Image (cartoon, rainbow, N blue to C red):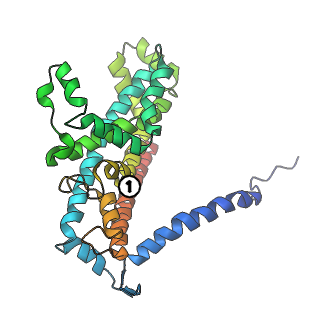
Amino acid sequence: MEAKSKNKPFPHYIVVFLFPAVLLYTVFMVYPLLDSLRLSFFTITDTRQEIFVGFQNFIKLFTNSNYAPRFWGALKNNFIFFAIHMLVQNPIGLLLATLLASGGFGRKFYRTVFFLPTVLSVVIIGFIWQLILNPLWGVSSSLLKMVSLGFLFKPWLGLVGYALPAVSLISVWQFVGIPMILFYATLIGIPDELLEAATVDGANAWQTFWSIKFPLILPTVGLVTILTFVGNFNAFDLIYTMKGANAGPEYSTDIMGTLFYRTFFGQQLQLGNPAMGTTVAAMMFLIILAGVLTYTILWQRRVQTYEY
């Protein structure tokens, strides 16, 4: 009997199904991205003429006394924003996922409740939390007084040192459901035989989690980390909703997204040169690209280590 060929012909009909998606993605994503990167090397005159200036826009962004303080401040705030999500949001998401995966009554109900803020409009979230934290008519002061912690209340959104952590924690509250669901899906996929074997060997709950569950969910930990990084350096809407384009007070909540908005649309120093806005966008892209490439390289090394 003649053996079947291992080299199967390429199913050309797949091209028919992929072409519309690839076309739309190219027109609305790839082309604007490439054109934005191109524009960052030009300046635009009053007559809308493009003049090639090379890296002058980047030099101006890094060193000019008008742009540099805002850029470096936004970059620092963005890393703080990311760190708070990594240190608060993702561990809480893992904790909630572990509790949900352990079973118990009302698991579906709590899973829905924890994930519900994620699907709400950012405008609604920002408006509600502004009302809650308002020092004049907000309920946060009353709630803290009810538990004898009224002395902790401050106008957090109006203080330079507290505004960014406050907005970051609001973002954590809204999006903690995403890492929770990702961790939960991985945890419930762990074979019961492994957990039963650990129990038979006398491992307690912590030992089972740290020695068996956590190594198995490491790929998901890496995925959640890179999604958090990309999402935080693309963030804009919550800070814009709560603190406006100037990201007050005194730019203390300014991140790369709000800096790009002000620069591109002319609210930064009344200049309104889109070329500088695209330069900020190019830096956002390069930072995100560097993070993704770093994760990919480190992950490949980890995979190769396990293979050998």
Residue 69 drawn at (x, y percent): 18, 65
Compared to residue 50, the image places residue 19 above or below, namely above
Compared to residue 256, the image places residue 282 above or below, namely below
Residue 237 drawn at (x, y percent): 38, 51
User: Residue pushed farthest right?
Assistant: 1
Asked which quadrant contains residue 280, the reply is: bottom left
**Is residue 86 visible in the rendered structure shown here?**
no
Q: Nearer the viewer, residue 134 or 287?
A: 134
- Secondary structure under tag 1 reads loop
Residue 105 drawn at (x, y percent): 47, 13
User: Residue pushed farthest left?
Assistant: 151
The quarter of the picture where the C terminus appears is: top left
Residue 183 drawn at (x, y percent): 44, 33
Asked which quadrant contains residue 11, the reply is: bottom right
- Within 10 Å of the Cα at label 1, are there few (<14), some (14-19), or many (20+) other Cα atoms? some
Q: Nearer the viewer, residue 115 or 84?
A: 115
Amino acid tagged 1? Asn
Q: Name the residue under label 1.
A: 234
| Residue 56 as seen in the image, left or right of residue 274 | left
Q: Which residue is rendered at x = 27% and y = 68% of the image? A: 268
Q: Which residue is rendered at x = 37% and y = 71% of the image? A: 278
Q: Which residue is rendered at x = 21% and y = 57% of the image? A: 251
**Is residue 19 visible in the rendered structure shown here?**
yes
Q: How many marks?
A: 1
| Residue 254 as seen in the image, left or right of residue 45 | left
